[in-house]
Image (cartoon, rainbow, N blue to C red):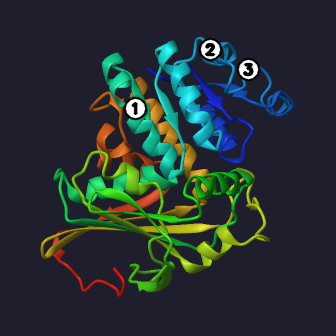
Amino acid sequence: MAAGQTVTVYGAYGHTGRFVVAHLRERGFVPVLAGRDQKKLEALAEEYPGLAVRPAAVDDPAALDRALAGAGAVVNAAGPFATTAAPVIEAALRAGIPYVDVAAEIEANADTFTRFADRARAAGAVVLPAMAFYGGLGDLLATAALDGRSTADEAHIAYGLSGWQPTEGTRLAGKVSAERRGGRRVRYADGRLEYHSDALPTLTWPFPEPMGPRSVVGEFTMADVVTIPSHLSVPTVRTYMSTEAAGGVTGADTPAPTAVDESGRSAQTFLVDVVVRSGGTERRAVATGRDIYAVTAPLAVEAVHRILTGRTRTTGVASAGELFDAADFLDSLAAAGHVTWEKGEESAAATAPAGV
């Protein structure tokens, strides 16, 4: 049984890290509070008496080793992941424990696959990047929609968010990614990442009810363009963002998320509509829920639980859809009330919205 095992949370005091710590405790795990800022860790520990506090800078391997000592797994919730992912993965490999992160940074996730695939596979280790709302959930939905198939002509992931109040970490990660791209934007086509400077298109996406058709920013590219093609043969993966959410995350004056309940969740709601097309047919899967940061915690913690209890399909660097039974994973989230989801039957491909 995984319950009772210790799990180090690196970046435990961050917005998403706090949700991960709380959810680990709900699931019976014992979190170890780790990260770069000792004062913030100690402040968080006052809310959780008895939990170990282990500060560690990413450029201090010995401190990272101490942070992971005795843990059954590590969850990295500290961005920007371009800075933190590789050092924490190295520490996890030294410790011989699974690594899970919640990175939404496209290039950081691609780096994880490129840099650690061979070593993690040779060690029989599990390295799971992007186990979050962006990257993980879309991959699970696309994999479930394909229902055992491994190929499709194209995958479309449309995010219908009621709005988006970004955290400080989201803004910093976005800044780092923009700098890495030289201000260009990225999309995934012809089986590879492409960088462009042309304007983002706007179109209407036919979200299912109760949301209905909604204006979206096309090619608002998220981590799904790394996770889905990592194990499925899909040469084109496109993601879309509701215009109100896109404006919120890019707006300089948008406030940080505001909690509206005792769990710390915001009022933000989401509908993720995934369509995979092959020839003249399409398959669809849809998930709905509340607060993209809060829902990342059950995604990551369920992953940790399944890894520690041997409910995985492979080792090495793997995305959620490859590592787990996607439909069963989503069913578990739904049974616990974290999301609702459904998979449609195969149907004739609908006429694509303009620009798709």
| Amino acid at pointer 2 | Asp
Estimate how packed mark 3 is, as few (under 14), some (14 to 19) or many (20 or more) residues with alpha carbons within 10 Å.
many
Sequence-wise first label, 2 or 1: 2
Q: Residue at x 30, y 52 (%)?
A: 229
Sequence-wise first label, 2 or 3: 3
Q: In the rendered image, which quarter contains the C terminus?
A: bottom left
Q: Quadrant of residue 5?
A: top right
| Amino acid at pointer 3 | Arg
Q: Quadrant of residue 147?
A: bottom left
Q: In the rendered image, which quarter contains the N terminus?
A: top left
Tell me: residue 94, above or below residue 320.
Answer: above
Determine whether the residue tagged by mark 1 lies in a helix, strand or loop.
helix
Task: Mark 2 vs mark 3: give the one in front.
Answer: 2
Contact flag, marks 2 and 1 (Cβ < 8 Å): no
Query: Looking at the image, can residue 306 be seen?
Result: yes
Determine whether the residue tagged by mark 3 lies in a helix, strand or loop.
strand
Question: Which residue was labeled with disc 2?
Answer: 65
Q: Residue at x 44, y 86 (%)?
A: 203
What distance separates the C-alpha of mark 2 from that of mark 1?
Answer: 24 Å
Determine whether the residue tagged by mark 2 lies in a helix, strand or loop.
helix
Q: Residue at x 71, y 72 (%)?
A: 251
Query: Looking at the image, can residue 310 be seen?
Result: no
Q: Residue at x 37, y 22 (%)?
A: 119
Question: Which residue was labeled with disc 3?
Answer: 54
What distance separates the C-alpha of mark 2 from that of mark 3?
Answer: 10 Å
Estimate how packed mark 2 is, as few (under 14), some (14 to 19) or many (20 or more) residues with alpha carbons within 10 Å.
some
- The front one of 316 and 282 is 316
Question: Which residue was labeled with disc 1?
Answer: 306
Tell me: residue 8, above or below residue 320.
Answer: above
